[in-house]
Image: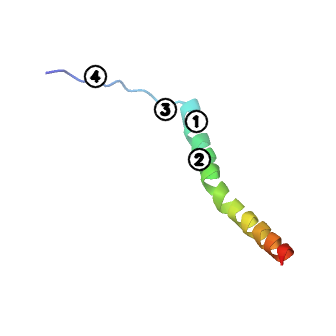
Amino acid sequence: MATLSVTNSTPSLIGGAMIIGGTIIGAGMFSLPVVMSGAWFFWSLRCDVRLV
């Protein structure tokens, strides 16, 4: 049977910053379509009114 060796290491500041940065960037990428949907709706209404 294999043995598992675990070493105690302290979390690094760079690793924590990468996790936080990735979370912030991911949240921004997720919210872009939601934010821009209002702009597309507005422009589509404007084009519809212009055609009539």
Foreground disc of the pair 1, 4: 1
The quadrant of the image that shows the N terminus is top left
Which amino acid does the dot numbered 1 rest on? Met
Q: Secondary structure at mark 4?
A: loop
Residue that carries the numbered disc 4 in the rendered image: 5
Residue that carries the numbered disc 2 in the rendered image: 26
* Colour pattern: rainbow
Sequence order check, earlier mark of 3 and 2: 3
Sequence order check, earlier mark of 2 and 1: 1
Q: Secondary structure at mark 3?
A: loop
Q: Residues within 10 Å of mark 3 (few under 14, many from 20)?
A: few
Give the Cα separation between the discs numbered 1 and 4.
Answer: 26 Å
Q: Residue furthest front?
A: 52
Tag of residue 18? 1
- 51 and 11: which one is in front? 51
Foreground disc of the pair 2, 1: 2
Whole-percent x and y of residue 6? 31, 25
Give the Cα separation between the discs numbered 4 and 2.
Answer: 34 Å
Residue that carries the numbered disc 3 in the rendered image: 11
Foreground disc of the pair 4, 2: 2
Decide if residue 46 is on the left or right side of residue 7. right
Which amino acid does the dot numbered 4 rest on? Ser
Q: Secondary structure at mark 2?
A: helix
Q: Is residue 5 above or below residue 19?
A: above
Q: Residue furthest left?
A: 1
Decide if residue 11 is on the left or right side of residue 41. left
